[in-house]
Image: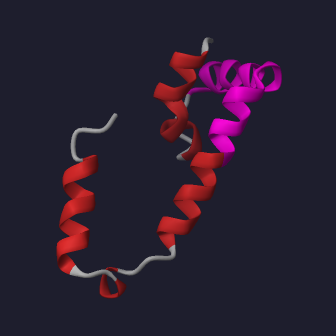
Amino acid sequence: MNCDELVELVTAYLDGALDPDARARFEAHLHTCDGCANYLQQFRTTMGALSRICDDDMQPAFRDRLLDAFRDWR
């Protein structure tokens, strides 16, 4: 697995949705690539921070801007 493939699979990895072979290749790459290991940690940190935000805490206009920004993100 290369770095581009790992980035494409990071959400599936965190959701536990990878098949055993893909998961093993993903984790093997992490052990040899500090950049991807850092990316995964940053992704986890971002997800953790975002999960603590409630819709009630966010102004509707800001929520709409976030949804627009990430609507087509892959």
Q: Is residue 1 above or below residue 46?
A: above
Residue at the location (23% across, 57% down)? 67
Using residue 37 as the reference point, say whether residue 57 is left or right of it: left
Residue at the location (25% across, 82% down)? 59
Magenta residues span: 19-41
Q: Position of residue 69 (x, y in %)?
A: 25, 50
Quarter of the figure with the N terminus = top right
Residue that lies at the very extreme toward the right in this rendered image: 31
Q: Position of residue 64 (x, y in %)?
A: 18, 65
Q: Position of residue 22 (x, y in %)?
A: 60, 21
Using residue 33 as the reference point, say whether residue 69 is left or right of it: left
Q: Is residue 24 magenta?
A: yes
Q: Is residue 34 above or below residue 50?
A: above
Residue that lies at the very extreme toward the bottom in this rendered image: 56
In the depicted view, which residue is nearer to us: 47 or 63? 63
Using residue 73 as the reference point, say whether residue 21 is left or right of it: right
Q: Is residue 15 magenta?
A: no
Q: Is residue 23 above or below residue 70?
A: above
Please, what is the dominant secondary structure of the magenta stretch?
Answer: helix
